[in-house]
Amino acid sequence: MVTADSNKQATPERFVNAINAHQLTEAMKAAVELEVFTAIAEGNGTAAMIATRCQCAERGVRTLCDFLSIHAFLTKEGTEYALAPDSALFLNRHSPAYMGTATEFLLAPHLREGHARLTEAVRRGGSALGETVLEPENPYWVKFAQAMMPLMRMPAEVMAAELRKGGEAHKVLDIAASHGMFGIFAAKQNPAAHVYAADWKNVLEVAGKNAEAMGVADRYHLLPGSAFETDFGSGYDLVLIPNFLHHFDLPTCTTFMRSMHAALEPGGRAAIAEFVPNPDRVTPPTAAAFSMMMLATTPAGDAYTFAELESILKSAGFARVELAPTEIGLDRLVIAYR
Amino acid sequence: MVTADSNKQATPERFVNAINAHQLTEAMKAAVELEVFTAIAEGNGTAAMIATRCQCAERGVRTLCDFLSIHAFLTKEGTEYALAPDSALFLNRHSPAYMGTATEFLLAPHLREGHARLTEAVRRGGSALGETVLEPENPYWVKFAQAMMPLMRMPAEVMAAELRKGGEAHKVLDIAASHGMFGIFAAKQNPAAHVYAADWKNVLEVAGKNAEAMGVADRYHLLPGSAFETDFGSGYDLVLIPNFLHHFDLPTCTTFMRSMHAALEPGGRAAIAEFVPNPDRVTPPTAAAFSMMMLATTPAGDAYTFAELESILKSAGFARVELAPTEIGLDRLVIAYR
């Protein structure tokens, strides 16, 4: 993200580059689809070598790799390209942390359309797409579960470890479990824990398979249905609510957190992972910018400040709310105590 | 454009932000369409006031303005937004330098489609759209002439002044005249100059109207047709070739510049305004990135280095080639002497 240099003469350069920002989206998408980062990781350094490996025209590869170098995803020395450290870690298909699949969700036609109709969204104060993202069993969330799993694995592991500092949980509810990572890591790190995963039925098929693959299926239970209508039972000592509240408006969040309060046993914790902007709503940039994703794609969702989350949680009956010091990927972790 | 900080732990933040870069495109487009910058210039500082002025929902405006603040097109103090200096100059409809119309060309569906099909363009080494951009009388260039005029006015004035340092030109040929600004300013600055504007017939209607509005119609002559087929005549002492060569491959540029050499009288100059990347092809960022625009939207165009332009011009018979020190907007000015 760009900072203005007020000593510099005004030129339309920043404006033109901002209008053309979609070029970076398309360049990253093309590079992932064509496996350009992987080709370079395999030792193909020049445009000619990458073109051969990726079955592309050398001219196309040269322009794409120059563009990625301008944006610091590659480096260039003479005619040799190399991977920037984060590209090597996240964009090389052979890396265990590969997350190129995230493009398939982040650039799903539905999300793109919501953004393409942003003028309309600003006029009405909510996504031009209406309620569709939140419809029952929308296959969109199956795609999310599949495509975003690599991006969420590490944060889920960090969050499980952070929560164990406050004591071992034995009955864990995982709301909007999706790929299941958050609950699965809670189960993996504590062999006594049983995890109850809640999500749409079609999405839980993904979570269930992942629980099996990661060896916790015998302590992994499925609760299919709407998070607002399912009877979750009670007696939980930990409820995980990762990246869920931002889809809804404040009253809906409060109603929902009341049901979570009821499901927890006394002393139990609700662990909320969210993009949490500062009170100014413009820092830190990535968390603050997430508000735009919600405006473009949900009827009334938002990136909530800590004060807003605290207000939701207090209204829902929680005794105490704290912001954990550890970052959970791009999220922060808010812990509410019953 | 982002720089990697190698001391920082690798996170997927840059990758996720790059995939989401299209949000900035849509935010700028929406803000221009809704006249958000203009509303703020008129004294509407809060989201509520801007929402009333722009007939939008306050929530939509707040998220949009926060997003524009994150990207430094606005500033935010408490709940008050203000314009960054370049936004005040270029994006307020009441400013004489307003260039919000540029979005209509830069985000024309055709250009968007070329970028959306970038994977295909990299594979084939040229736009997935084929030749369409270069087809005769494509209305796309009428849109360009209308939408880009505000962006080109100042550079055209600077270029005309720079060229007068090398002597007054009396018979000026303006290639791909478009909005006509480059030739019109040559005529305005030298009352003895006659300008011959070459472009498609439909585009020259725009240039002709502008020449009339700017008081030089009596010395403004139209040469409709393809730049590769029109008989331009001879005896020119100056040929203007602004932002034209980048649409074509090197052999085509060389052939074309031979015809320009023939049209010039001895001692005459060809003045080429172009994005000129350094030999590394990755700096300066905006000029170097223009290669991507050409890959996505033309069959074989490119942003040429000075060495490449010099080679074209020497092959076409020019005696001497120099890079002028003055920047012409985002372009550089290359002058070739017959």
Image (cartoon, coloured by chain):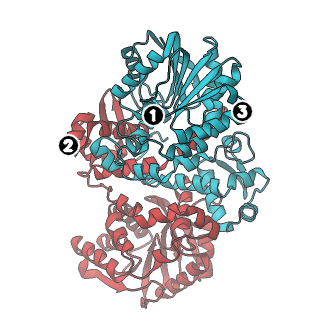
Chain colours: A cyan, B red
Residue type beneath disc 2? Arg
Q: Counting residues from the N terminus, which is met first, the one under dot 1 or under dot 3?
A: 3
The vertical placement of A153 against A262, above or below, is below
The vertical placement of A312 against B148, above or below, is above
Hey, which quadrant is residue B307 in on the image?
Answer: bottom right
Say which residue appears at 28% left-offset and 44% top-offset. A124
Tell whether A117 sits left or right of A235. left
Residue B37: x percent and y percent? 29, 45
Secondary structure of the residue carrying tag 3 is loop
Residue at the spot of label 3: A214
> Relative to the observer, which residue lies in front, A236 or A312?
A236
Residue type beneath disc 1? Ser
Q: Are marks 2 and 1 in contact (CB under 8 Å)?
A: no
Distance Cα–Cα, label 1 vs label 3: 26 Å
Residue type beneath disc 3? Met
Q: Which mark is residue B149?
A: none
Residue at the spot of label 1: A226
Residue at the spot of label 2: B53
Same chain for labels 1 and 3? Say yes or no. yes
